[in-house]
Amino acid sequence: MNGIVGKVVLGVAGTGMAVAVAAVAVGPRVADWYDGRHQEQSSYSSGGEAKADRRSMPTWLPDNASSVRYLMSTTGDDRLLRATLPEGRLPAGCKTGEVGKGTHPVPVTLKAGWFPEGVTSKITGSCGHYNVTLTGNQLYAWQDGAAVQAALRAGQPTR
């Protein structure tokens, strides 16, 4: 009896170890896949092209903006946007200066190699529900879904 019980215990322990090793090796990839499947990323040559293709693109983005990159959550209103503005100034309708109370962080659920970390410390203003940073003619904009939902409850339009 001891021989069989020992073999069963050894088999169960070995299987447990194999499962643990597999979880450590595969777990991060599964998490990345799960997070990434709720995101859509797009690139456009112009703001006009981006707005024609995607309803969620902010209307304040100038048609003549170039090199547009966009990342959005499909399960909420989190957004990242980068565009080159030929005039090197914020689009019409945007507010310049210290944003203050309306400032919201970059959504932690979204990460893109083209959206630099630390950009939130250099806020230039706001455009709609987006906080924006303008560095030269490069615009970085981000929208936090929770802030958008709060604004909608308060009756403020999103674009």
Image: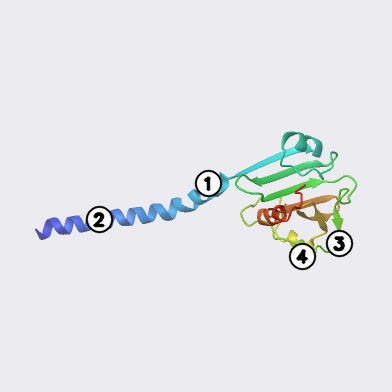
Residue type for callout 2: Val
Near mark 1 (Cα within 10 A), the count class, few <14, some 14-19 or many ≥20, is few
Residue name at image x 49 percent, y 53 percent? 28
Residue where numbered disc 4 is placed? 101
Residue name at image x 22 percent, y 57 percent? 10
Dot 2 lies on which element?
helix
Near mark 3 (Cα within 10 A), the count class, few <14, some 14-19 or many ≥20, is few
Between marks 4 and 1, how big is the CA–CA gap? 35 Å
Dot 4 and dot 1 residues touching (CB under 8 Å): no
Q: Is residue 79 left or right of residue 23?
A: right
Answer with mark 2 or mark 3, whichever residue precedes in sequence: 2
Residue where numbered disc 1 is placed? 33
Q: Is residue 32 left or right of residue 50?
A: left
For the N terminus, the quadrant is: bottom left
Residue where numbered disc 3 is placed? 97
Between marks 2 and 3, how big is the CA–CA gap? 64 Å
Tag nearer the camera, 2 or 3: 3
Residue 94 in percent (x, y) is at 85, 52
Q: How is the image coloured?
A: rainbow
Q: Is residue 104 above or below residue 47?
A: below
> On residue 12, which mark appears?
2
Between marks 1 and 2, how big is the CA–CA gap? 30 Å
Residue type for callout 4: Lys
